[in-house]
Amino acid sequence: MNQIAALPMYNVSPALAADWHALLVDVLRNVDPRAAIVEPDDLHTFWRRPDLLLSQTCGYPYVLGLHEHVQLIATPRFDAPGCESANYSSVLVTRDDAQFDSIEACRGARAAFNSTDSNSGYNALRHAVAPHAKNGRFFGATLETGSHLGSLRAIAEDRADLAAIDCVTMAFARDAYPELTGRLREIGYTRSSPGLPLIASTHVAPEQIDALRDALDEAVTAQPERARRLKLKGFSRLPPEAYESIRQMENEARVANYARLA
C-alpha cells in the first residue's frame, strides 16, 4: 500500500504553501520516498485514511473522535505572538475603525468564524464569549466564512465585526497581506491550548513513527531560512492527553449555557 501525505493547515499564501510542500518533501525523502503528496478535498475523510503517513489536523476534531483513528506524531512550536512553546491561542480581531476594545464590548456585534469544527476560530471564541452570554446568546449575527482569511476579509469589508484568528495564521497574514491586516486591530487573545497536531494513521509502524519525528526535526535544522519563513522553531512530542484542554474549553462553554456561537 502506497502511503500519502499532506500539510494543509497553514498554506496562507502561495509562497508559504511552497515552503510547506518543500518541508514535506524533505521529510518523506527520509521516511518513504514512494509516498505521494496529495491535495485532499475532504479533510475529515483524508485524516482517517489507513494509508495516511503524515498530515496536520486541528486539535478540535482530534479530540472529538479523530484521535481514535490516528497516532499523534508531533506538535509544532512557532515563533509568533500568542504562541508559547507548543501552545497557541487565537487573536481577537476587529476593524481598525470599530468601537470595540474588548470581548465584552462586542455584545450584539457580528461574529465571523471559519468553521464549526475549528478550535481557533470557533471553539476558542465560544469559550471566550461564554462568560458574557445571556440566555445562550451574545452576538447579533454570525457568519461562517470557510477560512481564517475569509473571516479577516469579512471584517475588513464590514460584513462582520469580530473573529478569533489562529495566531500563527495571523502572523502569516501580516507578512503576506499587509494591506488587509493593516485595516484590522487586535483586542485580545483567547485561552491557549496545544497547537495543531501532526498525525499518522494507526496503521503506520512504530519504526516509521520514530523516523517521521527524526525527519521533522532534521527538516527544521537543515533549512534554517525556510524554518524562519515558516516561523517554525521545532517540534514537541506531547502526550495525547494534552489535547483534553480543548475539550475542556468546549465543556466550560456548555456549562455556561453557551453550546453554540450565537
Image (cartoon, rainbow, N blue to C red):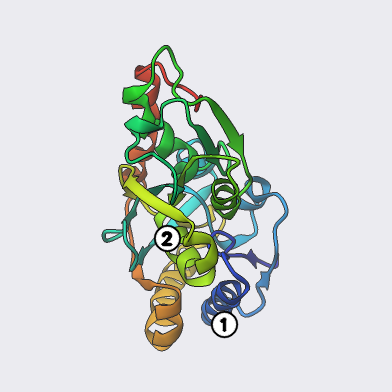
Determine whether the residue tagged by mark 2 lies in a helix, strand or loop.
helix
Residue to which mark 1 is pinned = 29
In the picture, measured across the screen, residue 132 lies left or right of residue 153, that is left
Residue flagged by tag 1: what amino acid is it? Arg
In 3D space, how far apart are the residues under numbered discs 2 and 1 (Cα atoms)? 27 Å
Q: Residues within 10 Å of mark 1 (few under 14, many from 20)?
A: few
Q: Quadrant of residue 1?
A: bottom right
In the picture, measured across the screen, residue 72 lies left or right of residue 32, that is left
Q: Pinpoint residue 139: horizontal percent, then vertical percent.
A: 48, 26
In this view, which residue lies farthest toward the left?
84
Q: Pinpoint residue 13: horizontal percent, then vertical percent.
A: 59, 69
Q: Pinpoint residue 187: horizontal percent, then vertical percent.
A: 34, 46
In this view, which residue lies farthest toward the right?
41
Q: Pinpoint residue 206: horizontal percent, then vertical percent.
A: 45, 63
Asked whether residue 68 appears in the rendered view, the answer is no
Determine whether the residue tagged by mark 1 lies in a helix, strand or loop.
helix
Residue 168: which disc? 2
